Image: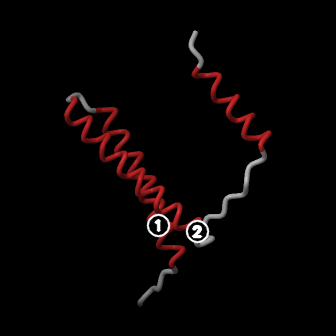
Amino acid sequence: MNEVYTEKEILGDALNSEKNATTLYNLGANECVHDNLRETMLDLLAKEHDIQVDVFNQMHTMGYYPTPAAEAKKVQEAKTKFECGFKAV
């Protein structure tokens, strides 16, 4: 039985794989005791994030991952919400 996958399914699977890889590299970096290994893991994490962005951009360009424009008010509300936790005391 030969299954034929669509381009959208293949790219979606690639995107999910990249999301999972970044999660695992992040966990690995957090658990490293040795600085050299941690730096290597963080370098790999950054590369995986770059690949994830490339796959997402390809899907978005092809219309497989549409993202509606955000309202300026909602963007400001989100910024305010998340900035509160990072202000110096």
Q: Residue furthest top?
A: 89
Quarter of the N terminus within the rendering: bottom left
The picture places residue 40, in percent across and down from the top left corner, at 24, 41
Image side of residue 85 versus residue 55, left or right: right
Query: Residue placed at 74% from the left, 35% from the top?
Result: 76
Q: Residue 79: horizontal and vertical position, in percent?
A: 67, 33
- At horizontal 47% and vertical 61% (from top left) the residue drawn is 15
Which label lies toward us, 2 or 1?
2
Mark seen at residue 61:
2
Label 2 vs 1, first from the N-terminus: 1
Amino acid carrying mark 2 in the image: Thr
Q: Which residue is mark 1?
A: 13
At horizontal 48% and vertical 56% (from top left) the residue drawn is 53
Q: Element type at marker 2? A: helix
**29 is higher (above) or lower (below) than 16:** above
Mark 1 and mark 2 in contact (Cβ < 8 Å)? no
Q: Residues within 10 Å of mark 2 (few under 14, many from 20)?
A: few
Label 1 SS? helix
